[in-house]
Structure formats: structure tokens, C-alpha cells
Amino acid sequence: MKSYKVVEFGKPLQRVEEPTPVPKGTEVLVRITAAGVCHSDVHLWEGFFDMGGGNKYSTAKTMNPPRIMGHEIVGVVEAVGPDAKGAKVGDKAVVYPWIGCGKCWYCQNGTENLCPTPRALGVNDDGGYADHVLVPHAKYLYPYGKLPEELACLYACSGITAFGAVKKAAGHDAGRPVLVIGAGGVGLMGVRFAKAVLGREPIVADIDEKKRKLALNNGACAAIDPRDKEARKQVMELTGGTGVGAAIDFVGAESSAQFGWRALGRGGRLIVVGLFGGTFSMPMPMFAFTGNQIMGSVTGTPAEMKEMMDLVTAGRAEPVPIIRRKLDEADATLQELRKGLIMGRAVLVP
């Protein structure tokens, strides 16, 4: 098996050749046909998340290198363990990577993505920057119909992350406009799902002019630069003075979250998804004065994964731009993503 591993944080990924694993018990061996390169991989590769104030959250224990990153995986079942049920050799599927311990309250209640002791592929366990991956159970495999495999893999993270976040806006926005902050790969998925799930095109905010244009070409009703001193005024004009019902922050920086908060109308909800880092400060009375909420959103549940896959395989969500790269370009692609040079989503093909 060929793979590209994080051996030392912040250093180039290393190519490793080793025996292809053999599935045991309920495990399923998947031959990978495409794997997405996600921006969270940049933070995992760096070895920390910026917590603000000079504080960092180390990923050393979480990842325990050497580790194969890559949690957006699609492939073909090549072998199954002796106790495996629900999959057969030759099945094509997207792999749900946000796997929990299977025993805690969260896992028992359908929210494995919130498990405090996860076994997430590409994070806690080896993932998709390889030509094979072991999946602990066939229940984590989702058919992708006639979707191109390079697109299908993206729904395992950027797709389910955007879908899960948009679902948190559904019903709460009360028909008011929605703001999507950040038009990177996940943000563009958010634009697509806003239209598919909420039934309307969102306003997009991004500091990059090229990404604003890309957002407009991919379904945004308007695109603004949040650094513009008139940006909040523009939001108010676009919403008829009410502000947005929900702001989904796919950046996750102090500046982006503050802009999202200022763009909210009364009773609005700020949904923080991105992991750029930093801190967020707010006078406590403002929560009571405005009736607004702040909440986080981390990927999505297995049930939401099924709901999303049913939606996309039915053709109810348009695809986002995809950049295809060879697996051997894993490190170079990761570095381009780190520098903000990837427009759309990057996918590695073995």
C-alpha cells in the first residue's frame, strides 16, 4: 500500500510503502479512488489549532504520528472481514469518516461526530492520502449513485460540514436572508446547500475578490468584502434593513465572527464552522438585548449524511469546482491550500 504520512508536524508528507492491511472482524477494506484535501488538514499537519492570545491546541495526541491524513474518501470495497455485513466486494461508496467509539451516550444517540473519544479516519486513525483504507464497519459506507467519484468524496467532509451547518439555519432564519462567510471549498458547498435546503441564494462575504466572483458564479445572490467600511450597511440594504436571520462562518476567525454577529438581525443565529482560530469577545448584555445566539457546528451525524447523500444523488444540489491532482502531489497540494491558492476543492486521485 502506498500512502503519504505526517511523520513530523510542519514537515513535508513522506511517501510510505507498506503491506496492504487485511480486514478483521467487521472491517471493510476500501480501495481509494479519490480523496479530498480539506483545509482542516492544514491545521492537523501544522500540529495545532490557534486558540487566540498566543495559545495553541496541540494535535499531537489526537493524531499520534505517523498518520495518514485525508477524511474525504471514496472508493471500491476490495475485501471484507469475516464478520462484515452490509457490504460486498465491488461496492462503490463514500466513506463517512467521523467515527466514534460506538459506546458513549453520543454514539448511542446517533451523534458519533460529537464523540469525545473518536476514531475519525484521517485524524485519529489512518485516512485517505493512500490507495487503501480500513473502515471499521460497512454502516459507514454510503452509495453515491451516478456522481463523479471526485465529487462524491467531497461530501464526506466539506459536504456534510456545510450541510450540517445549513441545517442549523433551517427553521431559525424565519425566511430571512442568510449570510455565508468565506467562499473557500466548504463555503461554496454552503452556498449550494443554502439554495437546496433553505430554498434561496445566500449573501456571501469574502476578502478575496476572486472568491467573491466564484461565489457569484456558484449561486450567491450577492458578494461583499467584509473589510469594506460600508460592508454592514450593504448587508442591511440587501436585507431591507432587517439583517440576516443566520450567518454561517466558514472561516472561524475573530474578524469573520464579529462581522457575522454585526450582520445578524434580532433573534438571529451565528453558526461558527471554520477553524482559522483566535478568540471572540462580546459584552454579555448584547445576548439579551438582541436575542441572538452563537453556536458551533462540527461536521454532521450519520443520519444527516444519509439525508445529504439522498439529496445530492437526486441531483438537488449542484457541484462545486474541483481541482484534480495525483496522489503523489499530496504535499504540494496541501501547501497550495495552506497559502490560499486553491479555488474550489482539491482532490487526490491514486
Image (cartoon, grey):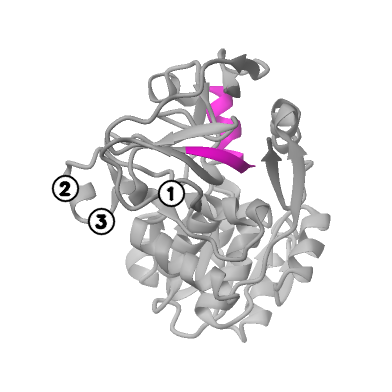
Distance Cα–Cα, label 1 vs label 2: 19 Å
Say which quadrant the C terminus sits in.
top right
Q: Which residues are magenta?
A: 30-47
Q: Amino acid at mark 3?
A: Gly
324 to the left or right of 74? right
Vertical placement of residue 141 versus 218, above or below: above
- The quarter of the rendered structure image containing the N terminus is top right
Instruction: Please name whichever residue, 274 or 102, is drawn nearer the observer in this view of the structure.
Output: 102
Disc assigned to residue 96: 1
Instruction: Estimate the x, y position of residue 198 in percent, counting from the top left.
Output: 51, 79
The amino acid type found where label 1 is placed reads Tyr
Task: Determine which of the numbered discs, if any, sits on residue 47 in the image.
Answer: none
Instruction: Identify the mark at residue 110; answer none if there is no mark.
Output: 3
Q: Residue at x 48, y 57 (%)?
A: 160
Marks 3 and 2, the one that precedes in the sequence: 2
Answer with the quarter of the image where residue 340 lies. Answer: top right
Mark 2, Cα crowd under 10 Å, few <14 / some 14-19 / many 20+, is: some
The numbered mark at residue 105 is 2
Name which residue type carries label 2. Answer: Trp
Determine whether 245 is above or below 253 in the image: below
Q: Compared with residue 144, is residue 46 higher up or lower down, i.e. above or below?
A: above
Tell me the distance, in whole angstroms, between the alpha carbons under discs 3 and 2: 9 Å
First in sequence: mark 3 or mark 1? Answer: 1
The image position of residue 30, as x and y in percent, is 49, 39
Q: Is residue 38 magenta?
A: yes
User: Which residue is depicted at the point 46% across and 61% down?
Assistant: 165
Q: Earlier in the sequence, mark 1 or mark 2?
A: 1
Q: Tell me if label 3 and label 2 are in contact, CB under 8 Å.
A: no
Report if the CB atoms under discs 3 and 1 are less than 8 Å apart: no
